Amino acid sequence: MFVVFFLSGLTICFLGRTLFKPVLFIVGVLMAMSLIMLIFYSTFLKSNTKSWVGWVVLGGSLLLGCLLGWIMMKIARLGAFILAAWGGYAVGLLLYNAFAYKMNSEAGFWGFTLGTALVFGILALCFFDHILILATALLGSFMAVYGLGLVAGRYTNPFTVAALIENGQIDSIDPIFYAYMAGNLVLCGLGIVFQYRQKNGNPDHDPYEGARTYRSYQYK
């Protein structure tokens, strides 16, 4: 998981605009797998479940992830919305873990994070290039630091925070999380600068070309 999240995160953070279509596919695969594994492990998959069941679920989630990634590549506008929304969701998780957790409300957690995701998704349809760079830098840096936290330890998992809120057990966040957050912001800033330098160095590159070509064909 460290290798997958760290390498995918760095790719998305620094090459989100340049490799728009491949990044859409990567995000689709990881999103579907993460959601399916989260749902299954929070319902019927337990620590004593037979290992082959876990492998079947993992394989099925990978196939569905590939399907979602392909759909996101083919329908670029939808893909851009989902990509930006997931970047916004990463922002929501960071901000909630850092400050808003004091609301101590499960509904507040989901409302805050999903609301941030929706705002980013809508903005991507209006300010595509800028939101694409911001969202991919944020999402990629979040994934890379999350992967690092899996092996370095003491990284506050956002979904663990949600579970603690649900059980009324949260009082404070481990201070080490703020060090992770600082690293997250630095990496995000580097990703934004790098992507804007790429954009300025190659102004003719159009990451949305597939969708625009399709719309032009429709008008003809």
Image (cartoon, rainbow, N blue to C red):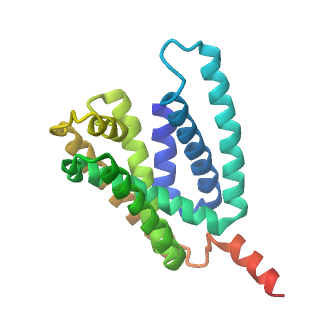
Q: Residue at x 69, y 42 (%)?
A: 64
Q: Residue at x 48, y 16 (%)?
A: 47
Residue 14, position as x, y percentages in the image = 47, 56
In this rendering, would 118 be left or right of 99?
A: right
The answer to which image quadrant residue 154 occupies is: top left
In this rendering, would 106 be left or right of 121?
A: left
| Residue 118 vs residue 91, the one in the foreground | 118
Q: Residue at x 50, y 19 (%)?
A: 46
| Residue 210 seen in render | yes
Quadrant of the rendering where the C terminus is positioned: bottom right
**Image position of 190 with respect to 155: above or below:** below
Residue 153, position as x, y percentages in the image = 29, 28
The answer to which image quadrant residue 217 occupies is: bottom right
Toward the right, the furthest residue is: 220
**Image position of 129 with respect to 153: above or below:** below
| Residue 91 seen in render | no
**Image position of 152 with respect to 218: above or below:** above
Q: Residue at x 54, y 23 (%)?
A: 45
Residue 115, position as x, y percentages in the image = 40, 62
| Residue 140 vs residue 41, the one in the foreground | 41
